[in-house]
Image: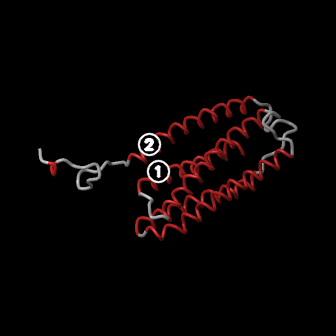
Amino acid sequence: MTPSSVASPRDLSGPHPVLPSAVFGMLIFVVAELMLFAGLMSAFSIVKSGALGWPPPGQPRLPVEATLFNSAVLLASAVVLFFANRSFARDRDLAKRPLAFALGLGAFFVVFQGYEWVMLIRQGLRLTSSNHGSFFFLIVGLHGLHAIAGLAVLARAGFRLSKGLLAPDTFAAAQVFWYFVVGLWPVLYFMVYL
């Protein structure tokens, strides 16, 4: 066998994987996280259906309208990220601005959720105040941690893009995670807030 007949790991002329390994790995992670949230939402549904009233007496109502607006902001970040991806495919420099905008919208969502938490705590909703408070802070808080992690992933992608080092597979994996964060939120919103 001659050295030229052996394909190097970077040889792009041979068959390409159907799914890049970075994306495949992120999809496995997302499926595991979906199972975690499914378990939490199942427990929440069981407790809520057995309650005489929800939220329990003496507990504040959740800010449904304000959070609906914040949900629209989060969904907008996914749309902008989609356009960043399209720009990235044509000219990587064109993706910088929409990626930064998507990051800004995602950061607004997280900060707004943090403000909402402060207001609810002041009104008496706490992790230990009731099942309502426990499930709210556990489920919404866990999603918030995922949103913060997603912002960190997007920020790293943005940094690598600014240095000209962002690989398409890495950007695709970052998008998978952010779309998971965004796509999960409407389900959580309708189950927890309504």
Q: Residue beneath label 2, please?
A: 25
Q: Residue beneath label 1, please?
A: 173
Three-letter amino acid code at the position of disc 2: Gly
Residue in the image at 80% along x and 49% along y: 118
Residue in the image at 63% along x and 61% along y: 105
Residue in the image at 52% along x and 49% along y: 177
User: In the image, is residue 57 above or below residue 113?
Assistant: above
User: In the image, is residue 71 above or below residue 41?
Assistant: below
Residue 131's tag is none
Residues at marks 1 and 2 touching, judged by CB atoms closer than 8 Å: yes
Three-letter amino acid code at the position of disc 1: Ala
> Left or right of 126: which side holds 159?
left
The part of the image, by quadrant, that contains residue 131 is: top right
Label 2 SS:
helix
* Label 1 packing within 10 angstroms: few (<14), some (14-19), many (20+): many
Q: Position of residue 21 (x, y in %)?
A: 39, 45
